[in-house]
Image (cartoon, rainbow, N blue to C red):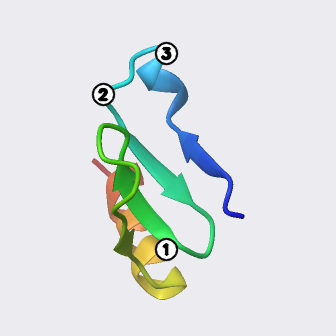
Amino acid sequence: MTVWRKSSYSGSSADCVEIGTGVGIRDSKAPSTHLPVSADAWAAFLKLARHQ
């Protein structure tokens, strides 16, 4: 079973994007569907996001 996490900036909101380690990302409003993201793609995304 995948443990899904959401940003601490989301607070108690149900409208957020969640990440599942080794699985991908999903919309909390549609948890049965997720978008697979490779580890390399996720690392590249985080690198860009940190510089914004």
Q: In this view, does 21 lie above or below 50?
A: below
- The image's mark for residue 43 is 1
Label 2 SS: loop
Q: Residue furthest front?
A: 32
Q: Where is residue 28 in the image (x, y as percent from the top left)?
A: 37, 39
Residue that numbered label 2 is attached to: 15
Q: Are marks 2 and 1 in contact (CB under 8 Å)?
A: no
**Left/right of residue 52 with respect to residue 47 in the rendered view:** left
Q: Which amino acid does label 3 sit on?
A: Gly
For marks 3 and 1, the one nearer the N-term is 3
Q: Is residue 37 above or below residue 6?
A: below
Q: In this rendering, which labeled residue sits more in front, label 2 or label 1?
A: 2
The quarter of the displayed image where residue 16 is located = top left
Q: Distance of mark 3 from mark 1, alpha carbons?
A: 24 Å
- Residue closest to the eye, 43 or 34: 34
Please give the name of the residue rendered at 45% of the width and 47% of the height, measured from the top-left corner.
18
Q: Position of residue 23 (x, y in %)?
A: 54, 73
Residue that numbered label 3 is attached to: 11
Please give the name of the residue rendered at 41% of the width and 78% of the height, measured from the top-left corner.
37
Label 1 SS: helix
Q: Where is residue 35 in the image (x, y as percent from the top left)?
A: 33, 71
Q: Distance of mark 2 from mark 1, alpha carbons?
A: 24 Å
Q: In this rendering, which labeled residue sits more in front, label 3 or label 1?
A: 3
Q: Position of residue 17 (x, y in %)?
A: 36, 43
Please give the name of the residue rendered at 30% of the width and 46% of the height, measured from the top-left corner.
30
Within 10 Å of disc 1 (Cα), the crowding (few <14, some 14-19, many 20+) is few
Q: In which quarter of the image is the N terminus?
A: bottom right
Q: Which amino acid does label 1 sit on?
A: Ala
The quarter of the displayed image where residue 20 is located = bottom right
Q: Which amino acid does label 2 sit on?
A: Asp
